[in-house]
Amino acid sequence: MEQTMSPALVRRPPALVECHLAAAGDSALVSADSAVALDGRQSVRAALIARGSGRLLVQLGFSLVSELKLASGRRADLVALSSNGEVWIVEIKSCVADFRADHKWPDYRLHCDRLLFAVDPAFPTDILPDDVGLIIADGHGAELIRAAPEHRLPGPTRKALTLRFARAAALRLHAAIDPLVGLSE
């Protein structure tokens, strides 16, 4: 599959510096051009794909929450919510081994209207299934290469997920203001 990349997707080596978050007492890697905090659940590459994907989703009019715990107990890499209530889940794959080892992503369809993979420009996209959307991303931006097919959520599931999304976002915002408040997502 031939892909054309926008100028925002030109691969540039990220300038990484170590940063100590005094309030939380954690160590994190951040990119010098814009903070990319790592919490130990993802690689630097995955965090950069998430950042670029997040920028695209915001440009498309979505709000997003990363690492959202779903009703099934699984965590979705990115959950995006549009102003009309449409829910997208973006599953980030940082390498082929990550894709081949992970068999939980089909379950995410039960929690979204559209399911997409986000990968970096070097990822061999021909191994990805055709029945999901595709985002190519790096730490600077992203491009929607293939739209995801729609599979509408039932009303009660949409309501529960929207409440879960709102509560997680509010708790995280409050934790940024008061780091001593525990997150109970």
Image (cartoon, helix red, strand yellow):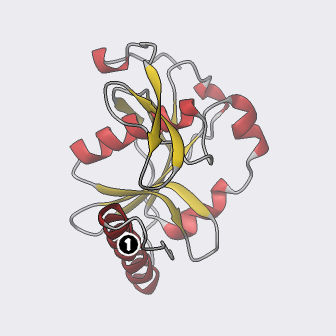
**What amino acid is at disc 1?**
Leu
Q: Position of residue 165 (x, y in %)?
A: 39, 71
> Which residue occupies the foreground of this view, 18 or 125?
18
In the image, residue 100 sits, relative to residue 102, either above or below, namely above
> Which residue occupies the foreground of this view, 139 or 1?
139
> Which residue occupies the foreground of this view, 62 or 45?
45
Q: Which residue is drawn at 43% across and 76% down?
A: 164
Left or right: residue 154 compared with residue 84: right
Q: Which residue is drawn at 56% across and 18% down?
A: 122
The quarter holding residue 72 reads bottom right
Left or right: residue 170 compared with residue 164: left
Question: How many callouts does the rendering have?
Answer: 1
Badge 1: how crowded within 10 Å, few (<14), some, or many (20+)? some
Q: Position of residue 81 (x, y in %)?
A: 32, 62
Q: Residue at x 74, y 52 (%)?
A: 103
Q: Which residue is drawn at 29% across and 64% down?
A: 177
In the image, residue 141 sits, relative to residue 100, either above or below, namely above
Residue named by callout 1: 171
Q: What element carries label 1?
A: helix
Q: Hey, which residue is sitting farthest right in the picture?
A: 101
Q: Where is residue 14 in the image (x, y as percent from the top left)?
A: 44, 19
Q: Where is residue 4 in the image (x, y as percent from the top left)?
A: 38, 16
